[in-house]
Image (spheres, rainbow, N blue to C red):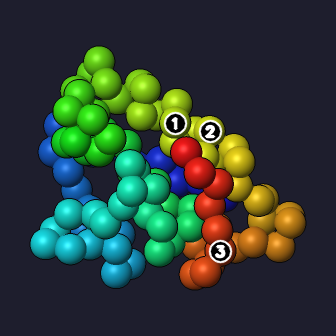
Amino acid sequence: ANVVWCTGFQSGFDWVDLPVFSGGDPVHESGIARDFPGLYFVGLFFLHALSSGMIHGVGRDARRIARAIAGRPSRAEGRSPLARGASTAPA
């Protein structure tokens, strides 16, 4: 039910077939793709802070994203993971 895609030291979004990009970068609010509930990003440069793309900052962002995921309604509650219009919990 989940996909975690780790690309290492270089971003690789060519496999994401969703209109969630602008100028090649994902459109998000601190790692949460608001137009696509269930889609999250971690480890991007300045995702939430200057240190977001560095090893000492990515853990903080990952914890915040994990809390947002944990606060989402489950599929059992009738939500598709990428259904448009579904709300996400605030980070």
Q: Residue at x 36, y 61 (%)?
A: 28
Expressed as whole percent of the image width and height from the top left, the position of residue 74 reads 78, 59
> On the image, numbered disc 1 is attached to which residue?
64
Task: Judge left or right: residue 75 versus residue 54.
Answer: right
Expressed as whole percent of the image width and height from the top left, the position of residue 52 reads 28, 34
Residue 46 appears in the rendering: yes
> On the image, numbered disc 2 is attached to which residue?
67
Q: Earlier in the sequence, mark 3 or mark 1?
A: 1
Callouts 1 and 2 close, C-beta under 8 Å: yes
Residue 89, label in figure: none
Q: Is residue 29 above or below residue 16?
A: above
Nearer the observer, 91 or 21? 91
Q: Residue at x 47, y 74 (%)?
A: 35
Q: Earlier in the sequence, mark 2 or mark 3?
A: 2
- Which element type, helix, strand or loop, lies under badge 1? helix
- CA distance separating discs 2 and 3: 17 Å
> On the image, numbered disc 3 is attached to which residue?
86
- CA distance separating discs 3 and 1: 19 Å
Task: Judge left or right: residue 35 versus residue 69.
Answer: left
Expressed as whole percent of the image width and height from the top left, the position of residue 15 reads 32, 68
Q: In the rendered view of the protein, which quadrant contains the C terminus?
A: top right
